[in-house]
Image (spheres, helix red, strand yellow):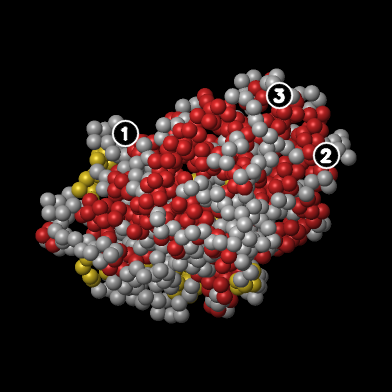
Amino acid sequence: MSLFSTPSGMTRRHFMAHVAGASALALPAMQFTKALAANSQDLKKRHKSAIMLWMGGGPATIDIWDLKPGAPTGGPFQPIATSGNAQISEHMPMTARQMHNLAIIRSMSTREADHTRGRYYMHTGYVPNPNIEHPSYGSVVAHELDDQSKSLGLEIPPFVSVGGGSVGPGFLGMTFAPFVVGADGNVRNLQMGLDQERLMQRMNMLASLEKGFISQNRGDSAKDHAKILDKTLQLMTSKQMEAFKTSREPKEVQDRYGTTGFGRGCLMARRLVEQGVPFVEVDLGGWDTHNDNFRALETQKLPELDKAMSALVEDLEQRGLLPDTAIIWMGEFGRTPRINGNTGRDHWARSWSVVVGGAGMKGGIAVGETNADGTNVETEPYSSQDVMASVLKALGISLDTTFTSKNGRPMKIANSGKVIKELFA
Amino acid sequence: MSSLTGTSNRRLSHGGWACVAAIMMGHALLMLASRCSADERSLAKVDSPSKGRKHLAQDHNIPQVALINDQIRQGWAASGLTPSGPATDAEWCRRLFLDVLGRIPLVEEINKFEADRAPDKQLRLVNELLSEDGPYVEEYARNWTTLWTNVLIGRAGGSEEGSLINRSGLQQSLRRALQRNMPYDRMVYELVNANGSGRPGDENFNGFVNFLAGNLSENGIEATAKTAQIFLGVQVRCTQCHNHPFNEWKQNQFWEFNAFFRQTRALRRFEQGSNDVTFVELANEDFGGEDGNAEEAVLFYELRNGLTKAAYPVFFDGSELNKSGYLEDVNRREELAKWMVKSDDLGKMIVNRLWAHFLGYGFTKPIDDMGPHNAPTHPELLARLGKEIRGHSYDLKQLIRWIVLSEPYGLSSRMSAKNKKDDPSLGEKAMFSHFYLRQMRAEELYHSLLTATEAHKTLTGDQQEKQSREWLSQFVTAFGTDDNEETTTFNGTISQTLMMMNGELIKEATRTDKASFLARVAANEKLSGKAKIDYLYRAALGRSPSNTERSLTDQLAALRKGDAVAALQDAWWAVLNSNEFILNH
């Protein structure tokens, strides 16, 4: 049979399955097609997902989640009551009404107060090591929930990063790399502008080139390239790409999230989770407030955060998704309790807060405490690993999972973090 | 590779180019003669190469190449590795063009190199690419300007609104320096000690100020960290707040180094009647000290336990500077620049940086974190090459010549059972027993596509630079943090593949209208149908198609029903999208 003959009258999906027979490249696409089980609708309702809200730059958690009114370090913001037991900043009024769904971990104590290192550590549970690249949260979750993605017939990438602030897949490979999109949800270069038939003929030609080079024993990057080609092809022909389009939502919904980049990102996260994407990360940068911290928070950062975060939690709850969707709010570190000469706060990792919720984690509580001026953690300190272990447990991922890094070293999932008990009490 | 074994199985080419080669060879030999005498004087103590190996790689009579070959071989012997065979001529040539000029070679350039039978053809090609009055001097300067700009201010540097960095200003000064092969120590001195306006066209324009311009807020913490890291391979950022837990650096050293930048000011200059910063002027001013005593201008930093300590300028080697903050007594930054260019670390760092550029991995991981806590894979080679480059007036082209003519640079990327374990991507020590595959940089892809489609002839350098910047921005995310951190998705992601399959750049490269590259290939009467496909494969991959590949393109041609351009377009698209194209091998 010629590689380039195309029987007439075939649907797109049949056609793909057909050419798959002749092409090693298109094979996984065919497997996905076969895996579309009859019960996928059921699964869709109960699938596990996580949404990370990444606060790039290091947010001043002392001004958001763990206020110290009256202390010399406290700053001008006042705490307000919430729908849960914990108080939060007066500039987060809408989120305050959702706090029964969220838990504040106030006893975070980490050691990495440099952006690059902190971002890596909080995303992976490991400190940077030149000889090994650790997988980030999203890659770990996408990898562990791969069977779920397959049974859902997921055709779009299992780990989406809105804004691109995430960390890579490390030794789990490019298949679990973050798929980076802008907040507008426009995926660039999606259309080839050729008919399906000619695209497949080109792909077959390409498959032959790929195989030839791979067979020359030049290393893994040659193979990885072929795998990503495959994923890309799958995505180009998928109707699921609609999930990226927040403009399909009613205007009032868009307005509730806010017409900011972060607002659209959070709305996209909800749509992607509904589509079955196991991990979505949404970035909100601009927290590196060495100067003029309070004005930046009050006039820009907190209003944007408050609107989008509260709408997301509310929507997930209303749509019955919250019991299966974990939410993680964090940055690379907190900021100094001491207010510097520029009315700013500097990098601070010793005592700060992270917020989690959903997927069965207990809401409405504050876990742990800092001292009167916020400079020290008074209760058991928690780490990036501990937060990760707790989120993974909530997603039903076994903490006994051990990965093997590329050089054969066993790597415990979440770097052997301990589950934070209060979240599951 | 024929030139390594001294034999060749290639047919002798005919035609006029052999004469050209002979003339160039004469020129190259002259250059070599003058160079060799200097090299031999300075490198009298190179050990004789290890004995016992039957096929010694050519060292081109350059002692530093012999040094590299010998040291790298000792590493293979000690780790029980057998090196891969040499890369083919075409592979080596492609590699060299990509790494030196930032683009793949033209078909004519590969053909010419393959047809050359002389044993010194590698040396001659290297000298041609590096020659200061040869045809490649502009391309060399363009490529290394890009590379240095990315090192100094990142890919996003200067692109933000209101940025204090003038990217094209930096590029202009770098390009001028690289065109005339400014010694590296001079370049570092100029960057660290730069004063003036960063905006081209100003009377006191000095593009080099743009390295420090964006790093001087918050008392120059980033200027401190970046200067130490980029030029000396010393990572001090963490020691800003505490003694480093894993390396030998202490908190006081960070602030003592920082003290050198305290007379430096980035003065914002505004457009008349507006609040928009239009340019930045870097200048030195008296530093009054944080306690108001300029005679002994002190700065204070805080220990983790809350205690405050004082710091004055002290170099890493412990030598102290006059404590005065008055410029008429001492110009701290100038003294720093003078001290840096004398430091051993400067030589080692540039060797490590260029080695990593050409071989894919440096002697340390990461390359800019050196010191006793991070043992290099080849400590003696690193130290001796560092000394050599210092002894050769920090001539970067000389260092490039030594590296690209060495045996490890010339090895095939095909692994064997006897060196498969030498894989640094798995976390193993890099022993360089085969060439490590690596993806082209985004800029390299851009210029390679221009070259492969011969579009580079219709655009000026400035137009190319502008277009490539616009195109590149889709892959770059800046985090907006104080350390100017950024990330790229041009690293084998789906986004990159989508761009390669469907993006504007590829659409442009696979155009079929009358004036297009493909139309010209299709209309070329000198090329038979078979030769046309051959030409495309050679243009992108530097090799001819295999029989299978040929038969697939034949089938394709049949399907396109005689539309030759359309069939070429499909084949060209596939070739450009292949792993073999994007991976430097």
- Which residue is painted at 59% across and 24% down in the image? B16
Residue B236 is left or right of residue B52, and the answer is left
What whole-number distance in Å separates the C-alpha atoms at marks 2 and 1?
57 Å
Q: Horizontal placement of B149 versus A409: left or right?
A: left
Q: Specify few, some or many for label 3: CA neighbours under 10 Å numbering under 14, 14-19, or 20 or more.
A: some
Looking at this view, name the residue that lies furthest to the right: A1
Mark 1: amino acid: Pro
Q: CA distance from mark 1 to mark 3?
A: 47 Å
The residue beneath circle 3 is B527
| Image coordinates for residue A174, horizontal then vertical, percent | 63, 55
Numbered mark located on residue B480 in the image:
none
Q: Quadrant of residue A9?
A: top right
Q: Is residue B204 visible?
A: yes
Disc 3 and disc 2 on one polypeptide chain: no
Task: Tell me the amino acid under the disc marked 3.
Answer: Leu
Residue B59, x across and y down, in percent = 52, 50
Q: Are marks 1 and 3 in contact (CB under 8 Å)?
A: no
Q: Which residue is mark 2?
A: A3
